[in-house]
Amino acid sequence: MVVLHGISLPPGQFGGTEIEAFFLNALDHDAHPYFDEIRGMQVSAHLLIKRDGSVTQFVPFTARAWHAGKSCFRGRHRCNDYSIGIELEGEDETAYDDRQYETLQQVLHAIFDAYPEISARMVAGHCDIAPGRKSDPGPAFDWLRLYDGLAKGRHPSFA
């Protein structure tokens, strides 16, 4: 499966290098008051898609990343064990950038091609696998736009 997330560091701010530093365990926790709250957390994702649509890979798709936490998808627990985590630079109430949707659609098509057992029906938000605990990618994420864009690509996962 694929789990979509939203992240901004500090919260609500975009465009810096803090997310990358956080995923690489190199965040300067003294640089912002919020960073002290996440001191000691170890989080990773397979991919980060920034607001400009650029992609950074942190963990190979064949390796486990630490993005889902306590989670369950369709009765199967511990989603980190079997999922690809994609972080989108964003937050719950701010619309995601057009370039992020375009890149995300391209990335998902590549994942569907490389892993035929993963289809569009196997894409969920962090909020879906950890309800009540997580809210991302949030109400600002346009799921219909994502699925419409994937369908226009006529990928076999929509057949």
Image (cartoon, helix red, strand yellow):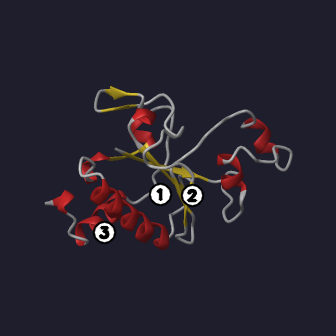
Q: Quadrant of the N terminus?
A: top left
Q: Secondary structure at mark 1?
A: loop
Do the residues bearing badges 2 and 1 touch, measured as CB atoms within 8 Å? yes
The answer to whether mark 3 and mark 1 are in CB contact below 8 A is no
SS at mark 3?
helix
Q: Where is residue 158, by image quadrant?
A: bottom left
Q: Nearer the viewer, mark 2 or mark 1?
A: 2
- Alpha carbons under labels 3 and 2: distance apart: 19 Å
Q: In terms of sequence position, does the residue under pointer 3 or pointer 1 come before the other? A: 1
- The label shown at residue 90 is 2
Assign a secondary structure to mark 2: loop
Disc 1 residue type (three-letter) = Ala
Q: Is residue 155 left or right of residue 144?
A: left
User: What residue appears at the point 28 percent right and 32 percent down from the top-left corner?
Assistant: 74
Residue at 45% x, 42% y is 126
Check disc 1 and report the residue beneath it.
Answer: 140
Q: Position of residue 143 (x, y in %)?
A: 35, 57
Sequence-earlier tag: 2 or 1:
2
Q: Residue at x 54, y 37 (%)?
A: 66
The circle on residue 88 is none
Q: Answer with left or right where residue 73 lies relative to residue 133.
A: left
Instruction: Nearest to the eye among marks 3 and 1: give it.
Output: 3
Residue identified by numbered label 3 = 149
